[in-house]
Image (cartoon, rainbow, N blue to C red):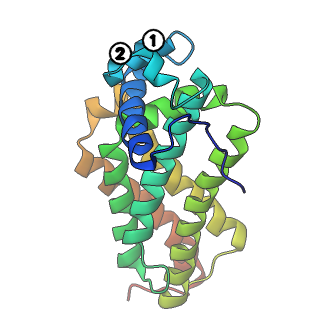
Amino acid sequence: MKKREVHASVKDERLIEKRRDQMIKGAVSLFKEKGFHRTTTREIAKEAGFSIGTLYEYIRTKEDVLYLVCDRIYDQVGERLQQELDMKRGNLESLKSAISYYFRVMDEMQDEVLVMYQEAKSLSKDALPYVLNKELEMVAMFEQVIRNCMAAEGMKLKEQEIQLMAHNIFVQGQMWGFRRWVLHKHFCLEDYIAGQIELLINGLTKGEHVNGNLSSN
C-alpha cells in the first residue's frame, strides 16, 4: 500500500526529519494528556520547541501530525521486530524469546501505544488503511515465527489458529500499555511477560498433548 505523502515547503530532507521528530515527540506528550481533538497545532509547535509558522513549513494540518505519529510508531516497532525475529528458523524457545522481546518493546513505547489506541480512529480515510496495514505486516511476522516453530517441533496448527495466535501476541503486548492503569497494580513487567507466554504456549501445545503428538514423557 502506497505511503501517504505529507507536504513540506522545506526541501532539506535532514531538516524535515529533525523537525518532524521534534513535532512527533511533542504531539505524543500532548495527545496522551489532552487527546488529539483538544490539542491545538500551536500547542504542538510550542511543545516541539518552535513557532507555529515553522510548524506549518513541515505539515499542512493537525491530521498530518497524527498520521506522522502513527506512522513513526509502527515504523519503529516494525524495524525492531525485523531486526530481532528470525524469520527462517524457529523452535519453542525462539518463539518465547520473540514474544518476550516484543513485549519489552511495548513496555518502552507505552505512551506511544496508548496514543495509538486512543487516537488512530481520528486518522483520515486515506491514512487509516495504510497505518493499519503496517500492523498487519507485523502480525504476519509472528505468523511466520509460529509456522517455523510448528515445523521445528513437529506440531500442527490450522492456518486460522496460527493467525489467531499471532494477533493474540500482538494485542497482548500492546495491552501492557493501554491497560497499564490496572495491570501495573498487579504485575511487574517480568511477571506479565512470563504469565502471558505461559498462557500462549499452553494454548499452543494443549491440542498436541491431547492428541499424543507432543509427549512430555
Cα–Cα span, label 2 and label 1: 6 Å
Dot 2 crowding, Cα within 10 Å, few <14, some 14–19, many 20+: some
Where does residue 27 sit, x and y in percent of width and height? 42, 25
Q: Quadrant of residue 186?
A: top left
- Write the residue at 46% across / 48% down: 13
Where does residue 25 sit, x and y in percent of width and height? 36, 32
Left or right of 70? Residue 54 is left
Q: Do callouts 2 and 1 mark residues in contact (Cβ within 8 Å)?
A: yes
Identified by mark 1, the residue type is: Arg
137 versus 191 height, above or below: below
Quadrant into which the C terminus falls? bottom left
Q: Quadrant of residue 47?
A: top left
Secondary structure at badge 1 equals: helix
Where does residue 49 sit, x and y in percent of width and height? 30, 22
Quadrant into which the N terminus falls? bottom right
Q: Residue 46 carries which label?
A: 2
Which of 62 and 188 lies nearest the eye of the viewer? 62
Say if residue 204 shows up in the picture: yes
Where does residue 90 sit, x and y in percent of width and height? 44, 83
**Mark 1 = which residue?**
42
